[in-house]
Image: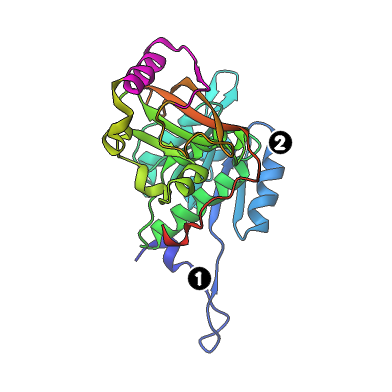
Amino acid sequence: MDEIATRSTTMDDKKPSARIPIRVLLLDDHYDNLILRSAILRKHGYEAISASTIEEAEARLQEADIAVLDYHLGAGKFGTEVANSLREKRPQVPIIILSATLERRFGGVEDMHLLKGYSSVDDLLAALRSFEAKRRGKPVVVDARDFYYSRINMAMGDEVVLEIMDRDGNWQYVNETLARLLEKKRSWFLGKNLFAEFPELGEEWQDIIRTVADTRETYIDRTFRGLPLPRKSPRYIWNVLVFSLKLHDNRNGVVLSARILQRKDPLKLPDPAGA
């Protein structure tokens, strides 16, 4: 049976077992970061194993159930050195890399790469829970695209319709606002093509998306020419912005956002319960 799934202790045979916390190896050369992350993990029921150097981390590899490693440690050293050692010695242990960019590639299929920033705490906790559930044999799908692209959505706000797609119009991410406007679930969009689902958009919008992706120009449209959004009316006047983005897999892509410039009453989104 799985090590994480079976780690427990008992006072005696008559008392129920008490679960031992999942042990998370934290590597960061900034002591303040270690203190903060350790406190957060303990608050949420995890046991933190702190290390500020590669040597300290490698000395405690056998204790870790999950590893969270800072990518850049300064002085030309990187957390991937510990990741390589851990994968060789204990390949079953999931590894999370914290870095300033998600365009790097760090190896094994069980790795997750989280972007440092103000929201990385929530992302880290979600990743730990997902890895833990996976180790317990539960079917869990962890999509790093949500961690990557949600930064743009958070920066723009909830009332902005947001779509992220590759140069051919294949959806990589949509926000909840778009999904509710079109009365779909967000998961419905991933893997589908904008122009296949909405053929009325025609070649003009295909050219716009490809041009922005390839030339890294920015496109602004206040005339509403066929986008799958509520029609232009006294209630809805949309400002559409399309700008380029390097996708999570390093391909050229675009961010398409639509913001209401003017409306006479608050934007009321359909109830997603029936979507």
The quadrant of the image that shows the C terminus is bottom left
Q: Please state the extent of the stretch shown in magenta in the rendering.
A: 204-224
Query: Type of residue at label 2?
Result: Tyr
Q: Is residue 87 magenta?
A: no
**Above or below: residue 152 compared with residue 93:** above
First of labels 2, 1 by sequence position: 1
Q: Vertically, is 38 above or below 219?
A: below
Q: Is residue 180 above or below residue 115?
A: below
Q: Amino acid at mark 1?
A: Ser
List the residue tagged with mark 1. Answer: 8
Lateral position of residue 201 relative to residue 130, left or right: left
Judging by the rendered image, the residue that carries numbered circle 2 is 31
Specify the farthest residue to the bottom: 14
Query: What is the x, y in percent for residue 155?
Result: 62, 33
Image coords of residue 179 (percent x, y)? 45, 46
The local crowd at label 2, few if under 14, some if 14 to 19, many if 20 or more residues have their Cα within 10 Å, is few
Q: Residue at x 54, y 78 (%)?
A: 10
* Quarter of the rendering containing residue 163: top left
